[in-house]
Image (cartoon, rainbow, N blue to C red):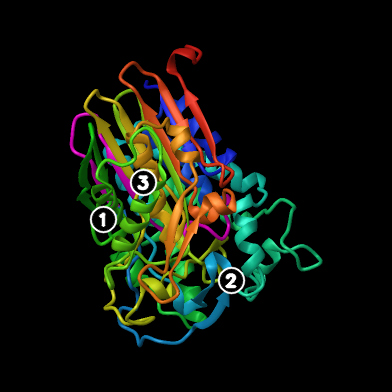
Amino acid sequence: MPDVAIATPNEAAADAGEQVARAGGNAVDAALAASLVTMVNEVGLVSLSSGGFVTVQPPDAAAYTVDGWMDMPGRGRQLGGGTWDIHTEYGGGVDITIGPGSVAAHGSLAAFEEAHRRDGRIPWRDVVAPALDVARGGFRLSAASRYYLDYVHDSIFGWDETSRAAVHDEQGEVTTELVVLPDLARSLELIAAEGAATLHTGALAELIATDVLDRGGILGNEDLAAYHPVVRPSLATTVGDWTLATTPTPSVGGEGVAEMLRLLDGRPRDSWTDADIEHLVAVQREVLGRGPGALRESGSTAHCSATDTDGRACAVTVSSGYFSGMIARGTGIWLNNTLGEQELNPGGLHALAPGTRLLSNMAPTVGRHADGSVLAIGSPGAGRIATAVAQVLAGFVGGLGLQEAVHHPRVHVHHAGRADEVVKREADEGLSMYYGGVGAALVHPDRHLVAAADPRREGAVRLVRATELPHP
């Protein structure tokens, strides 16, 4: 069994990655297990009703990306209705559409299952087990969850009775107690036993579709049954001695990372200079301000990275948008609002044909060095995903240590090319989760493990060495 390096958004997710690695799992198993835990305890950032991308570097083959992002629903029914708009100052201020009509067809679990089928090592039920344990025992909201919920606990998470009860205390404030959702544990039991099928053609699909339609939404059984993850060759780019591979279209995030790295042209070298920073601002302005295909601001995300000494790397990014606000009855699952992410749906709420894959900013990235080292990296952060990943990669390839590159203050050009453009510099503000939450894992050919978590969030890492495990 391989040694495994793991980077995650929180301690419980890191524990999950370690648990499956100690059970004989590899980087894919560890990253997926950790990501499943985030779908339980990163409330407001991601849930089982989510979409995502899994980018894998196999030991002896080209990197691939499993696209599990969300589809436009609405087959066989009239579109429109079941939504309303809110405004929040979260993320610098954003207008959001929520409600049952904002729920898209989820795909992250189907993508996880496909990546596991191709490159996992231990049984699927063992990958799901840590998330099931967290759901059964209850969990406290992470710092990132609380930060987001402080803005929207009433406007988004307060209109549905079950949701309100789960995240509020008796005074109507965001709870600091354990969150326990018995229905969520039962949902995970089904997922462990039946796989993603239960969310698309089984009991959970029926519960979700029935509740959404009953409340005026458009996500039906036909939409969930028709959903399929798509496996694509990753978008490859060369930076120094590294071959990096990230998400291809229709995700615009990977293209943004690749283009920024190309335009940075080898900067920085050893450290970021003032001239490098100014060049970085110009690069971001060029890439972020290109119009319809440019990166856009959007909802929160969670990211996990893992690498192993077999030469495998896995980067997983998942999101439920800003959340619709509803928990599907009988499931314990908060539903996404990806149709209501106005920045990612410039044509309108229900403008796309049913079955169309939506836009995304996600950019889970893997890399292989000429010496055989492998890397997995990615970040949450909405429209700041690509800028965060590109800056950390540029600093690391340019000579910074991995943790040093993650920790370094960042720059983000907010509303690039618009009249209200603002160049936001973290060096002036102090480290902030606004600038992302990069998680990166690295394995060298000599089996040396490195993992870096972002101090901007409650990041956690684990290094699991097979040589230190007890023999059966």
Using the image as rendered, state which of residue 266 and residue 88 is in the foreground: 266
Q: In this rendering, does residue 437 appear at all?
A: yes
Eyeballing the image, is 144 above or below 376?
below
**Mark nearer the viewer, 3 or 1:** 3
Residue type indicated by callout 3: Asp
Q: Which mark is residue 255?
A: 1
Helix, strand or loop at label 2? It is: loop
In the picture of the structure, the residue carrying the numbered disc 3 is 276
The magenta segment is: 41-66
- Please identify the quadrant where the N terminus is shown: top left
Q: Which residue is mark 2?
A: 89
- Identified by mark 1, the residue type is Glu
Real-space Cα separation, disc 3 to disc 2, in angstroms: 31 Å
Instruction: Determine whether 228 is above or below 210 in the image.
Output: above
Q: In the rendered image, is residue 120 in sight?
A: no
* Residue 311: quadrant of the picture: top left
Circle 1 sits in a helix, a strand or a loop, which is it? helix
Number of the front mark, 3 or 2: 3
Local packing at callout 2 (Cα closer than 10 Å; few below 14, some 14-19, many 20+) is few
**Which callout, 3 or 2, points at the residue further toward the start of the chain?**
2
